[in-house]
Image (cartoon, helix red, strand yellow):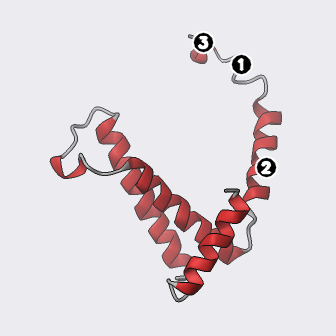
Amino acid sequence: MTIQESQKLVDKWIKEVGVRYFSELTNMAMLTEEVGEVARIIARRYGEQSEKESDKNKDLGEEMADVLFVLICLANQTGVDLQEALTKSLLKKTERDKERHQNNPKLKS
């Protein structure tokens, strides 16, 4: 599925199941909340913090998908074509960082 197809699918779901989009501000707050859930899993599963028993069965992929869903909602609401935006972002990063990372001694194995 392409990003554009994902945007259309989310829009269809919102209109058929979700009734309507929440406001952009509400969705921004929801995005922050969902990113926090991803951060919690990463910090406890891969970081130094111990994982709580209640967090051990949480699915990282599902939480990442929740982040993506809300991000797509925001893109749809604000008229952003995420496919185009990602392509532009990768081009920008390639131009800006094409030698920087290769010459970074901190990244050498």
CA gap between label 2 and label 3 equals 27 Å
Query: Where does residue 108 sit, x and y in percent of width and height?
Result: 60, 12
For mark 3, what is the residue? 108
Determine whether, in the image, residue 67 is placed left or right of residue 51: right
Q: Earlier in the sequence, mark 1 or mark 3?
A: 1
Q: Viewer-nearest of labels 2 and 3?
A: 2
For mark 1, what is the residue? 102
**Amino acid type, label 2:** Thr
Q: Secondary structure at mark 1?
A: loop
User: Who is closer to the viewer here, 38 or 97?
Assistant: 38
Q: Earlier in the sequence, mark 2 or mark 3?
A: 2
Residue 99, placed above or below residue 73 = above
Which residue occupies 58% across, 64% down? Answer: 71
**Amino acid type, label 3:** Lys
Q: Secondary structure at mark 3?
A: loop
User: Who is closer to the viewer here, 88 or 64?
Assistant: 64
